[in-house]
Every structure is written in C-alpha cells, then in structure tokens.
Image: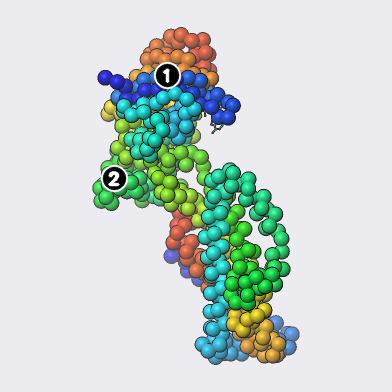
Amino acid sequence: MTAQIVVKNLHKYFGKLEVLKGIDIEINKGEVICVIGPSGSGKSTFLRCLNRLEEPTDGEIVVDGETITAPGTDINKIRRHIGMVFQQFNLFPHLSAKQNIMMAPLELKIKNKKEAEEKALELLDRVGLSEKADVMPRQLSGGQQQRVAIARALAMEPDIMLFDEPTSALDPEMVGEVLAVMKELASMGMTMVVVTHEMGFARDAADRVIFMDEGIIMEEAVPEEMFTNPKNPRTSEFLNKVLTT
Amino acid sequence: MKIMKSFKLTKTLYSFIFVLIFWYLLHISVKTAAIPSPYETIVNFVEIFPQKLSLHLGASMGRVFLALGISIVLGSMIGIWTGISPKADSMISPLVYLLYPIPKIAFLPILMILFGLGDLPKILLIVIIIIFQFTMAARDGVKEIPRELTYSVKSLGLTKPQMYLHLVIPAILPKIITTARISLGAAVSVLFFAENFATTYGIGYFIMNQWAMVNYKEMFSGILALSLAGFVIFLIIDLIENIVCKWVQQGRQE
Ligand SMILES: Nc1ncnc2c1ncn2[C@@H]1O[C@H](COP(=O)(O)OP(=O)(O)O)[C@@H](O)[C@H]1O
Ligand SMILES: [Mg+2]
C-alpha cells in the first residue's frame, strides 16, 4: 500500500533564500506526525506546501495517489480534502460560529442549508461549543475560536488535517481544551501533520516526530526515541532548550 | 440595544433643539433680514417644499448619489486591485498620492468644456474629488487582512470569486462606509459650488438665486432643505452600516 502523502525532494525558495532544501517523507493514512524545530526552520512553509498555499519550487507531492504538484491540477478540489488550522485569525470575523462552519460546504454546494446546519451543530457539540453557535468570533476566547476553526475544517469532511502551531497564540489555560479536541481527532484515525511546541502532545499523540532545522529533516523517530535518545546533536540541543524553559 | 436606540433619539432631539435655540438667538441679536426666524422659515419651507424645493433638492440628490455610487464602486475596485497586486500598487499608489492633494475643484471649467453643460461635468467633478479616498480605504482594508486569515480561507478550497465575496468585501466594507460618511460633506459642498454654473435646477442654484433676488426667507428654506437632506443621508448610511456591518458594531460594544 502506498502512503497517503508522499513528498519527494521538496525545495522552496523565496527569491534567493532557500527555505526548504530537499524534504522527503511518506505519511500513512491515520498517522499523526508532529513537526518540531526552531523558528525559521521552514516548518510552516513545509506545511503550506502540502496544500500548495505555497508553490513548491521543485520536487513532487502526491496526496491520495494524485500528484498535486503537476501542472493543471485543480488545487481547490484537493484543498477541500485537506483541513488546515493556523495560529490565529482563522475565522471570518463577520460570521457567527455556526455560519463559519456552514460557509464552505454551502458555498461549494456540497451540502444544502439544512444538512450544513445539522453538521455544524453536530461539530460544535463535538468540540464542546454547542451553546456558542450564534456567537461572533470576537466574543469567543482564543481557545474557543480555535475549536470552531477545527470544526470548520472538519465540516468539509477532510481526510487529512494540517495544524500550524494551533496553540502558540493561546493563553496557557486554553491550550488544554484545543489539544484535547486534537487528541480525540487523532484517536479517530485522522491523518494529521501538526507543527507544535507542545512536547507533551507530541509525546502522547504522535506516531512519529520530525525534527526540522535549516530547511531539512534533521531527525525522524517515534516520540519515545526522539525525546529520550535523540541521535542528532542539533536535536538534543533544541530539545534541551524547549524542555527546560 | 433598545436603550441604545432611545438614547440616540434623545441625543438627536437634543441637538435639534440646540440648533433651533442658537438660530433663534442669532435671529434676534443680529436683526437682519438675512437671518429669518426659525418659525417663519419652517412655515415657508412647508409651503414651498412640494412645488419648488423638492424639485431642486431631487436634482441635487440625484447628482450626489450618482457621484457617490460611481466613486464607491470604481474607487473600491481600483483599491482592491492595488491592495492585492504589488505591481498595481507600485503603479497606481504614486499616482493617487500625486493627484489626491491637487485642488480639483478648479477643473470645473475644463470639465464643462469637455462634457457640456449638463449633469455629467458636475457629477464628474465630485467623482474626481472623492474617488481617491475610496481607493485608499479599499487598498488599506485589503492590506490589513491578516495573512493567516487568507491562508485559512484558501485552505477551505474556495474559488477566487468566493474569496472576494467572503473575505475581501467584508474586510473593506466598514472602511468604505466610514469613507462615504466623510466624503458626503465634500460631495455636497462641491455640488453646491458646481450648481452655480449653467443650471437652473439644483439646491445650490436655488439658494444662490434666492440670495440674488433678496428673497432671504426662501434662501433660508433652501439651506434648511439642504441640511435636512444631509442629515437624512447620514441616517441612511448609519442604517446601511447597521445592516451590512453588524459584526463591527458588536465588536465595539465589547
Ligand atoms: N512569504 C515569504 N516570503 C519570504 N520569506 C519567507 C516567506 N515565508 C517564510 N519566509 C522565510 O522562510 C523561512 C522559514 O519560515 P517558516 O516556514 O515560517 O519557518 P517556521 O515555521 O519553522 O518558523 C524564514 O526565514 C522566513 O523568514
Ligand atoms: Mg511557523
């Protein structure tokens, strides 16, 4: 069986700056991958290449057997199967929580109004925000906004979820509620790629941890291995820094 | 919400009464026919509005609305374009900065030579004076959209037109409405000026004509009509804002 996501020799330049210097990885269906590494190492760029929010300069990305880097690919269609959640500013500020979730399935005519609303309420319940259906994003806490953002991505019924530091902008007391939703998602067999500084989450939920530095994958291991016995000196240095502070 | 509304109503009432008292005091202290009493004026206003004033006011408001509409649509479109495309920004923004401070009101004679004596040069004059503000407002609105929000909306797989409808337009609407409110004063003033040339319809013409005929009571009714019209347009803009930008209001009340 081939992997769900195959990345081959991925390079990305911003002008003359080479940010990704040849990334190779295969991710299987249902796997949870945590990506760690210092800031500026290219983690976000890598993640955004996976649904071509950034155009790869070179290399190949295959998702569910389809080469999404091939010319002529309908990238919008592929994005609909790949949910993505960011640090912040995820929600439409002018739509309520429920409307945010209903919007894409309605616009893309995947669901009718009644189905979309039912799904939205079901997802709000799943992320523990049933009573916030009609509340505007500004009146939600950061943690609640992130949970709505996850629900909105799930409304498209994606096969893959990408998370780019979803808890980094949150007050510490709200990190737990977002991680809990993500853990539940992981346990239900969602394929997930999560850029995070939450080493506890990586340890508990990840099948594999990837350490990125200076645009390449420096080390790749199961969490146990990565956190107790890192092979690469750069990995130990990084882990020492984040685990002691 | 209800409390807010009645509060607003008392505030409006209060300012009306204030204006009336001030006007009355001016009338009795200055003692010239140029400032008739509020009572006389209102009686005269009610008398001449249906046959005369409404025609002039209608002609003027038509011009203002058309000019405002053209400026909003065209100005926003150019603004969105410059906000999205760095190339367009580097081409158009320097032009806007150059043209914006030029006193374009002096161009009225040229516009009349080019476009005749009808409504067109008057509308165009307003447009070239206020359009730049809409362009700048739209451009800034687009540039202020957080990059992550754009990514996040794109990641849902929305098409380009859907992105405009659900991301770009909501981002610029509050700014456009604020700009409309600010530009309205300029638009009416410019129109007042323009209506003094080559026209026999329009509230600007009416007021200046009554002045020339030393008909101060009617002149003052004209001023009253123009003021009321301005006030009504302000209310309309408020109403539109309340309908299309609800979320901005809700944010403010936090
Ligand atoms: N749109 C962009 N244009 C130019 N440089 C960029 C852009 N996005 C990211 N970079 C640069 O690429 C490098 C990697 O960034 P990023 O992928 O955000 O790293 P990380 O997420 O690991 O912090 C950084 O040096 C950053 O400045
Ligand atoms: Mg990042």
Residue type at mark 2: give it: Ile
Can you tell which quarter of the image residue B130 is in? bottom right
Residue appearing at x 57%, y 71% in the figure: B64
Is residue B20 visible in the rendered image? The answer is: no
Residue appearing at x 54%, y 50% in the figure: B81
Residue A16 location, x and y as percent? 59, 26
Mark seen at residue B239: none
Residue appearing at x 47%, y 69% in the figure: B6
Quadrant placement of the N terminus of chain A: top left
Residue type at mark 1: give it: Asp
Residue A203 location, x and y as percent? 38, 19
- The chain ID associated with circle 1 is A
**Which residue reaches farthest front?**
B114
- The chain ID associated with circle 2 is A
Can you tell which quarter of the image residue B201 is in? bottom right
Mark seen at residue A24: 1
Count of labels shown? 2
Q: Tell whether label 2 touches label 1 (CB within 8 Å).
A: no
Which class describes the residues within 10 Å of circle 2: few (<14), some (14-19), or many (20+)? few
- The secondary element bearing badge 1 is classed as strand
Q: On the rendered structure, is B79 left or right of B111? A: left
Q: On the rendered structure, is A181 left or right of B19? A: left
Q: Nearer the viewer, residue B195 or A123?
A: B195
The residue at label 1 has a CB less than 8 Å from ligand 1: no
Q: Nearer the viewer, residue A130 or A213?
A: A213
Mark 2 = which residue?
A110
Residue B26 location, x and y as percent? 70, 82
Which class describes the residues within 10 Å of circle 1: few (<14), some (14-19), or many (20+)? some
Among the two numbered marks 1 and 2 on one chain, the one whose residue lies closer to the N terminus: 1
- The secondary element bearing badge 2 is classed as loop
Residue appearing at x 55%, y 45% in the figure: B85
